[in-house]
Amino acid sequence: MSKVILITGGSSGIGYEAALMLAAKGHTVYAAARRADKLEPLGEHGIKTLLLDVNDEKSAQSCVQSVLDAEGRIDVLVNNAGYGYFGPVECVPLEEARRQMETNVFGLSTMCRLVIPHMRSQGSGRIINISSLAGQSCFLYGGWYHVSKYSVEALSDSLRIELKPFGIDVVKIEPGGIRTQWGHIAGDHLKECTEGSVYEPSAAKEAALLHYGYSSNYLTSPTVVARAITRAAVNRRPRVRYRVGLGAKSLAFLHTVLPDLWWDAGMRLLGGPLRTPTA
Ligand SMILES: NC(=O)c1ccc[n+]([C@@H]2O[C@H](COP(=O)([O-])OP(=O)(O)OC[C@H]3O[C@@H](n4cnc5c(N)ncnc54)[C@H](OP(=O)(O)O)[C@@H]3O)[C@@H](O)[C@H]2O)c1
């Protein structure tokens, strides 16, 4: 059956591919993001596009209302908008940490709060939250990004318990390394916030690794995540979580079986030995 689906962060990467795949399967898809020019090509595939900044409550309200006005319902919300501000906790300006939490966590919760009353009155609905492997384990210099994705995990688990009685399913997608702009954005932030600090040499190495990895074919194509989102959106009984993409299952497993200090040592190897900070 055709569903009405709203995808946040539809202008690029995972959200863009998910919009294409869901529309190709005959669903009514709304892709929303801040950059109109990046959304525009989706129109050729019958996808409706909306401007949305999840950090702006009014923008979120008008986005959800536009879908309801046109379709009278929202069957599936895919909370995909998000980004990584990488950097050592000591270096990331708190306003940047807050901004990242606003987008990745509070923006996601705003979208949930706006659609839940409608899904409840429909007696059905599905909320698909794009979490991450970064919500299960910590990588070098991922600090505040991990805080945001661990929060998405906790919020999703809580919502799943709360919303089941209303016929609303909550599903987590936990991708590993996916070839999108994400790594370049995270890498740029990492470089920018460590310039002139004791972390600079190690952070430069890690940033280079992010840029290299996210341009290479080692990482998984976003279509693989789009496929998982499609399954989560349409299957009669969706799973609680879908782990897809490079390292999503293997690293999550390793993290649970390795002693913590072994994991930490492995992560430190990524950035090479740190220089001892001088007071
Ligand atoms: N790539 C990976 O390896 C990976 C792994 C695990 C999880 N994830 C998660 O997957 C999701 C999608 O990321 P991606 O890899 O596809 O990266 P991406 O290509 O950079 O896409 C991010 C999307 O989020 C949107 N966005 C960012 N801030 C927004 C805001 N304030 N309001 C509305 N939209 C906003 C961007 O659109 P505009 O800039 O046009 O607004 C863009 O469409 C993110 O939540 C990310 O954390 C990615």
Image: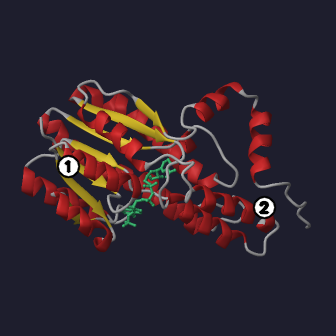
Residue denoted by label 1: 23
Q: Is residue 131 above or below residue 98?
A: above
* Inter-mark Cα distance, 1 to 2: 43 Å
Crowd rating for badge 2 (residues with CA inside 10 Å; few <14, some 14–19, many 20+): many
- Residue toward you, 77 or 15: 15
The picture quadrant for ligand 1 comes to bottom left
Image quarter in which the C terminus is found: bottom right
Q: Amino acid at mark 2?
A: Ser
Residue denoted by label 2: 202
As helix, strand or loop, the secondary structure at mark 1 comes to helix
Image quarter in which the N terminus is found: top left
Asked if residue 224 can be seen in this view, the reply is yes
Q: Amino acid at mark 1?
A: Ala
Q: Is residue 90 left or right of residue 68?
A: right
- Residue toward you, 199 or 157: 199
As helix, strand or loop, the secondary structure at mark 2 comes to helix
Residue ID at (34%, 39%)? 227
x then y, percent, for residue 255: 66, 32
Which image quadrant for residue 247? Answer: top right
x then y, percent, for residue 193: 67, 70
Residue ID at (19%, 51%)? 29
x then y, percent, for residue 92: 65, 65
